[in-house]
Amino acid sequence: MPQAAVRTGTLVQVGHLARRSIIRTARQPAVVVTSMVFPLFLLAINSSGLEAATNLPGFPTEKYLTFALGLTFMQGALFATMGAGQSIAEDIERGFFNRLQLTPLHGPALIAGQLAGTLLLGVLQGVVFLTVGLAFGADFEAGPAGVLVMFALAMLISVAFGSLGMTVGLRTGNGEKVQGVFPLMFVLLFLSSGALPRNLLERDWFHAIATVNPVSYIIEAYRSLLIAGWDAEALALGFGLGLAILAIGLFAATAALRTRMERT
Amino acid sequence: MIGRHARASWAIAWRQLYKMLTNPAFLLPSMLMPIFFFTAFAGGLVAVADSPGFDYPSYTTFQYVFVLMQSAVFGGVFAGFSIAADFESGFARRMMLATRGRSALVIGYTLAALARASIVWVVVTMVALIAGAEVTGNGLDILGTLSVAIFTNIAALLFACGVAMRMRTMQASPLIQLPAFLLIFTAPVYVPRELLEGWVAVVADFNPLTAVLEAAREWVIGGSAEAGLAFGAAIGLAVVMAAWAMTGLRRAERAT
């Protein structure tokens, strides 16, 4: 078959699966709402409970709400991770995956199509989180162009972590086991510079963990747009790590898909 | 009659405990969660103790007491999940048919929740002491701390029990978890109440867990606390939740 025809075929397959994934996400209001309500609830608690931290010397902003908004974006992405894993695990449990295998479907098309729903969730979360944050008085130093960069980062991180969730879903093929991985994701979130900037993490061991935790740098990239304006280093690290996680996630998901196809 | 009732309660409690002790998947989440919160808060937020007006001697101890109360609440919440699962699988229905005094079910689940929380408290305390928490209160102070923790655990279990017996499905889990989460995190978690700002400061004034948490934080360091208010809040909450659980039981009886 000519190369161009194969490419067109794959794109059509991606289109069909992406449509299904997006409709599926839109039809699960409980998943969409939960992935927004919990991060916003934590934002509301932290911005009020930790406002006193803004009095610490070296704290980068006068409003804890502005500082905490980056963590909210990251938390939303972790919910997207679970959504992606859960979706593919459900497909396996219900036999839809087996039926897909009877069709001439390409592996990359399946992965890309499934991640479309995660991307949609990432965009919706970005709109809601930023709107709520700004409505309650958060600063946004980077201006309108920064909003676009913020959304680009949110989409990249959602898809990157979504691909990791998908890998777990493909490997386990079980929704409950995917849920079991959720607390591990929260370990990454809490052992980061999410609650305080790294220069204010006094415990050496915590500082060391937060420094090697990639989630710290992703949160700091979001935060830079809110607090500093344009910080090239923070953004390069955030986007760079996002792309690296996406590459690892896609590689792992492809390998897991191959194993799953051999098994079924 | 009382002997039979006590035996039924014990049988239900023992079944729950056996399930928990022989299957780590039931015990580990309720144990790991407080340890994880303790690590994240006591490790990552210690600089908050440098905020002007923060007058508690040790941030590790400050967070240890929070985690102790959090495990009291979540001990009840996780036990509530088991009750919902028992109803969903039909096991609770068979227990109701086999038990004359059905309040034995509530008492049995309460005993099991208390045992679960006690195991978690021992582990959390060991971790906190290793991490440098300073417990300088005398025996009576520690007894006060444990007593309010026990009443808080009972109140949480009775709340979860009431929800689980009304819904009789695992889908009740978010409805059990969310109010518990709200109760815990609208108390002074990170800083003393005087340093809270915004809406949490207002809600914390009316949250019964605030009185419990503040008193326990004082007792643990040998300070003076408003014992009457703390016990009143914890016992009052348990009494209200007992009524909620018993009306839930009556609904479950009518439905089965």
Image (tube, grey):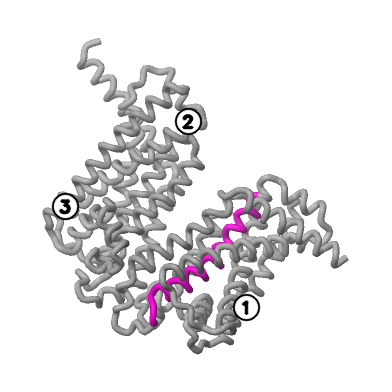
Indicate the secondary structure of the residue bearing disc 3: helix
Residue at 22 percent across and 56 percent down: it is A222
Q: CA distance from mark 2 to mark 3?
A: 37 Å
Asked if B59 appears above or below A148 in the picture, the reply is below
- Residue A238: give its label: none
Give coordinates of residue A74: x percent, y percent: 31, 53
Q: Circles 1 and 3: CB distance less than 8 Å? A: no
Q: CA distance from mark 1 to mark 3?
A: 52 Å
- Are labels 1 and 3 on one chain? no
Crowd around label 1: few <14 · some 14–19 · many ≥20 (10 Å): some
How far apart in space, not on screen, are marks 2 and 1 (Cα)?
Answer: 49 Å
Kind of residue at disc 1: Gly
Quickly name the residue at label 3. Answer: A235
Residue located beneath label 1 in the image? B236
- Secondary structure, mark 1, is helix
Q: Which residue is mark 2?
A: A92
Question: Which quarter of the figure has residue A56?
Answer: bottom left
Q: Which chain's residue wears label 2? A: A
Q: Is residue B60 left or right of residue A93?
A: left
Question: Which of the two residues, A83 or A163, is positioned nearer the viewer here?
Answer: A163
